[in-house]
Amino acid sequence: MTAEIVVSHFYALRDPAGFDRGARLLVARLRLQGPEGVRSFRFLGAGPTERRLVAVYAGAEPWVALHDTTLTWPETVALRDAARLVRTDLYGPIPPPVLDWVLRLGLGRMLRHDGVPITGYPQGSERNPPSIWRRESGGRRAG
């Protein structure tokens, strides 16, 4: 069994040009300053109102490190301002550090694991409220 984690995020665009600009800048910065173990990080066009991010991580540590590192970067904030995250597909294991981030980000209802919609993951808890987007991004809320 591999510890590799593959994630696909599906976005509904509010500002396609702003999203594409933020995506290009984020990928460029990740190449220079991103954590080790991020094997692939690609944005794909899916029509004029949709985009997809497909990322491959060597395991839980790079996934957590990426989120710890990039959540407040201006490039990431620009993506959240330009689009709404509508679904996240996760393939591979969901170890506790990744599950903690899933809960902190409030991804519960939009998460699918190995292609199957997941029920029972809360949108947050008193310990990990879904409002992390507001706290981490200086008041902005991700789509």
Image (tube, helix red, strand yellow):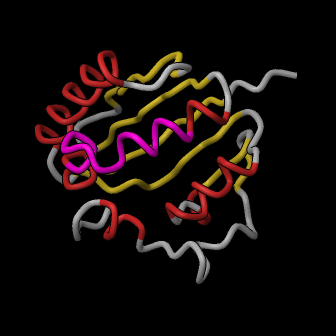
Disc count in the image? 0
Q: Residue furthest bottom?
A: 126
Q: Is residue 10 left or right of residue 27?
A: right
Q: Is residue 111 left or right of residue 4?
A: left
In the image, 51 versus 100, the foreground residue is 100
Q: Position of residue 84 (x, y in %)?
A: 33, 56
Q: Point out the image quarter for the N terminus.
A: top right
Task: Name the residue located 50 percent from the left edge and 61 percent from the top edge.
Answer: 105
From the viewer's perspective, is residue 54 above or below residue 114?
Answer: above
Q: Is residue 113 left or right of residue 1?
A: left
Q: Is residue 3 visible?
A: yes
Q: Main secondary structure of the magenta part?
A: helix
Q: Is residue 3 left or right of residue 79?
A: right
- Segment colored magenta: 64-77
Task: Name the residue located 51 percent from the left edge and 37 percent from the top edge.
Answer: 65
Q: Position of residue 54 (x, y in %)?
A: 48, 28
Task: Name the residue located 59 percent from the left edge and 56 percent from the top edge.
Answer: 102
Task: Name the residue located 74 percent from the left edge and 39 percent from the top edge.
Answer: 114
- Magenta stretch: residue 60 in it? no
Q: Position of residue 30 (x, y in %)?
A: 33, 24
From the viewer's perspective, is residue 15 above or below residue 139?
Answer: above
Q: Position of residue 34 (x, y in %)?
A: 39, 25
Residue 33: name its quadrant.
top left
From the viewer's perspective, is residue 127 above or below residue 98?
Answer: below
